[in-house]
Image (cartoon, helix red, strand yellow):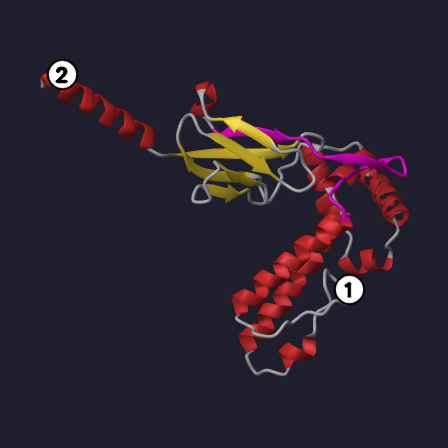
Amino acid sequence: MYRLLLIISVCLLSVTVRGQDTYFYGYVKDSITELPIQDVHVSTGNEDTSDYTNIHGLFVIKAHEGDTLTLLRVGYFSQKIALKGTILSDTLHITMVPKTHELESVTVSSYSYEDYQADSVDRIRYFEQAIGYAKPLFDNANTGAGIGISLERIFSHRQQNKKRALRLFQEVEEEKYVDFRFNPIIVHSYTGLKGDSLQQFMNKYRPSYKWLRNHTRQVDLLYYINGKLKKYFKR
């Protein structure tokens, strides 16, 4: 009887220990640029335990030793990390390798215009759901950032909060377009900068949305980077 109770107790203890969740913190960076990667989906296979990296490449996820983290991001090879051994003693430092190809002698990200458009559509759908607008606010004409926005539909209403939300959404879409064109991989490939130096260069010489829309060719962007690079090194 005592032996049976002992076996049951050990089994229950094992289940309890196994079930104790721990918060794991991680940092994800690009293997080429050494910059943090945003919007990496980190999961353990359970949707209740997943997270996305922020602008600093940081994430936090609830899991336990023995789980396997899966990291997914468009334009990067997927990564799997087993939560065991010495890696559990500190923040997880993870490097993801981008899928790249050669274009005009410059290495660029494989995050294509189609990928950018798909992400834009997802953001639009989320925005429409968030503001509770029954009719589509957007048309299929690509007149600006992402999908064309039917302004007359929203401006015909008196709901000022929705107007402000739409303006903010437009600003976000424009920033996403600049991020897509002026991405770290192409800037690194042309300048050789990486890490903090690359980040400083991109922050200082980030082109405007209007300029990029008026200069859609890849070579235009390369001439732009070249001009700014001369100023950077002269400084």
Q: Quadrant of the N terminus?
A: top left
Q: Position of residue 229 (x, y in %)?
A: 83, 40
- Residue 216 vs 46, above or below: the answer is below
* Numbered circle sitting on residue 216: none
* Towards the viewer: 11 or 106: 11
Q: Give the residue drawn at x 73%, y 47%.
A: 204
Q: Is residue 228 visible?
A: yes
Is 58 placed left or right of 143 in the picture? left
Q: Position of residue 210 (x, y in %)?
A: 79, 61
Is 65 placed left or right of 182 in the picture? left
Q: Which residue matches tag 2? A: 3
Spatial separation of the CA atoms under disc 2 and disc 1: 73 Å
Decide whether residue 223 is among the magenta residues: no
- Residue 194 vs 5, above or below: the answer is below
Q: Amino acid at mark 1?
A: Asn
**Secondary element at image label 2:** helix
Q: Give the residue drawn at x 68%, y 69%.
A: 138
Q: Give the residue drawn at x 63%, y 71%.
A: 136
Q: Which one is earlier in the sequence, the residue at label 2 or at label 1?
A: 2
Q: Residue furthest left?
A: 1
Q: Is residue 206 visible?
A: no
Q: Which quadrant holds residue 10?
A: top left
- Residues in magenta? 91-112
Q: Which residue matches tag 1? A: 142
* Towards the viewer: 12 or 177: 12
Q: Which quadrant holds residue 14?
A: top left
Q: Give the residue drawn at x 56%, y 74%.
A: 134
Q: Position of residue 43 (x, y in %)?
A: 50, 38
